[in-house]
Amino acid sequence: MAQSQTLQNGASSRSETQQADTATQETPTRSNGIKQQVNSKSGHRDAPSRDDSATNTEPKLSGAELKKKQKAEKAARRAQAKAGEPEAGPGGGNATLNAQGQGEGPKKSKQSQQEQRAQGKPGQDSRIQHKSSGSTASSAPRPVALRRRPSQSGGASKEPKKSDKEVGLFRHLYGQPRRYSIEGASKEVHSAVLALGLQMSSYVVCGSNARCVAMLLAFKSAILAYTTPPSTSLARHLTSHYLSPQIEYLKSCRPISISMGNAIRWLKDYIIKIDPSVPDSEAKTSICSTIDTFIRERITVADTAIAATASSKIRDGDVVLTYAKSSIVQQTLLTAHAAGTRFRVIVVDSKPLFEGKNLVRHLAHSGLNVTYSLVSAAAHAVKDATKVFLGAHAMMSNGRLYSRVGTAIVAMLAHERDIPVIVCCESLKFTDRVALDSIVTNEVAPPDELLLSAEPAMAPGQSSQAGRASIARWKDVPNLQLLNVLYDVTPAEYIKMVVTEYGSLPPSSVPVVHRISTEKDVRV
């Protein structure tokens, strides 16, 4: 019995000890709840609770010691509330509790912010920093748009203005300046393409057909010198990695023409369709032979067919007027003269290239009666004309003619006098683009070319340095701008007929011929 009572007493003592420990552990929880209720009433919260790691390292306090600590913290909070000072939180500034009793982060009261602004003191929030000591700006950061906007004071740098020598209406056409040297060209550009680019920029090779043929022949030389890298095929690497630098170099020298663009698309499409199993030597031979066939069929034979058709429109006693120089118009006039037709030719020309001079020289050497006139006298020259033959840089899908600047003036004057206007154009120059004016799409040449071509002839022994100096000074003259556009657009109602290798047709049939010629190229 004594032993059983002893065991019962030991068990009861252990249970009492466990209950005491449990009460000791529950005491902080109840105290925390009381603490949160007090904070919700007073509008403040105490310092954030310690981490579990810190709590584990501190010695345990008895119930009496905890009560004393709570009373001391409560007295300190009351003293701070009476003094009106914010309680310092972990981030500086007051911290509020949400409905669940959790801290929302440090915030400043409106009253304290107003007092600090009035005193000119920075806020307690460590996230706001003042960069300059002499700054009187607000502590809040400025919006991005206001920070990027230049200051009205003279100390801030302003954006540089565009050149005052560019005509605003055509400013979108200026683009990259024309290249006149091979400096900076890609190492992959072939020497034949380098030479062609310089010839195009200096107008040694001029004219849509001449540039297209010269480009294809240069590509032919570049393809013969091409070697396919290992682990790739000719069809994939030749167009994207080898021909692209050649094309970009030509574009930097002078914008490519419509016929050049059509030829480039045809060439790329043909190369892509080459079977990868074909040896490289055989593939390059096939490409070069196909380029020769393309030049012969689309340009050489087409010009012969057009010249034969257009020359039949010329009768004895006609006075044929043409503008500038077109290779197909020149071939048409020579074909008609060789057929024994007697007629007279009037060549209207304009600067800066004066291409009509070369046409007059060739026609005069062939025995034709030629009259030369500038575009300023076109109204008088048209009075004697019976037919007008014009070349084309391109024929647009809406039937409009895109040709050398000044062509529209001649066509308009001829249309006013009911003189038929005949355009000689290969189908290679047809495009699906639409042009309503010559402002959206055009080519702007350097303005200095207008003055260089107009330099007066010097007397024997007289130096031309004075004339060149006066040309160079035009950029220093304020409010003076020079515009040198190379092409204009002639409306379709001014054109009577378009002669192609497919026959004579009205301007409205241009889209049909373009589709037929494109399908033919695809079959080839």
Image: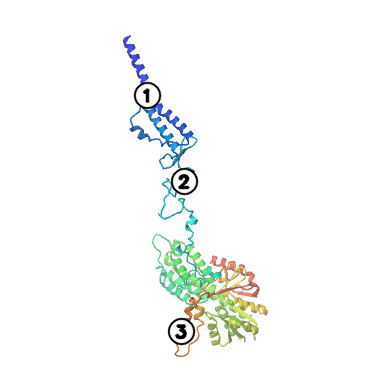
Outermost residue, right side: 418
Q: Earlier in the sequence, mark 3 or mark 2?
A: 2
Q: Identify whether 474 is placed above or below 2.
A: below
Q: Earlier in the sequence, mark 1 or mark 3?
A: 1
The residue identified by callout 2 is 115
Looking at the picture, how far across and down is residue 230, in whole percent?
38, 61
Numbered disc in front, either 2 or 1: 2
Q: Amino acid at mark 1?
A: Asp
Task: Find the distance from the CA under tag 3 to the CA under tag 2.
Answer: 76 Å
Q: Identify whether 363 is placed above or below 509.
A: below
Question: In the shown orientation, is residue 23 left or right of residue 411?
Answer: left
- Element at label 1: helix
Asked whether the residues under the numbered discs 1 and 3 touch, taking CB atoms below 8 Å apart as contact, a structural biologist would say no
Q: Identify whether 415 is placed above or below 441.
A: below
Question: In the shown orientation, is residue 361 left or right of residue 343?
Answer: left
Asked whether the residues under the numbered discs 2 and 1 touch, taking CB atoms below 8 Å apart as contact, a structural biologist would say no
Q: Residue at position x 46%, y 32% from top?
A: 38
Numbered disc in front, either 3 or 2: 2
Task: Find the distance from the CA under tag 2 to the CA under tag 1.
Answer: 50 Å
The residue identified by callout 3 is 466
Task: Find the distance from the CA under tag 1 to the CA under tag 3.
Answer: 111 Å
Residue 285's image quarter? bottom left
Q: Is residue 262 visible?
A: no
Asked whether the residues under the numbered discs 3 and 2 touch, taking CB atoms below 8 Å apart as contact, a structural biologist would say no
Question: Which label sits on residue 21?
Answer: 1
Q: Identify whether 37 is placed above or below 18.
A: below
Question: Viewer-proximal residue, 183 or 148?
Answer: 148
Quadrant housing the N terminus? top left
Question: Which label sits on residue 509?
Answer: none
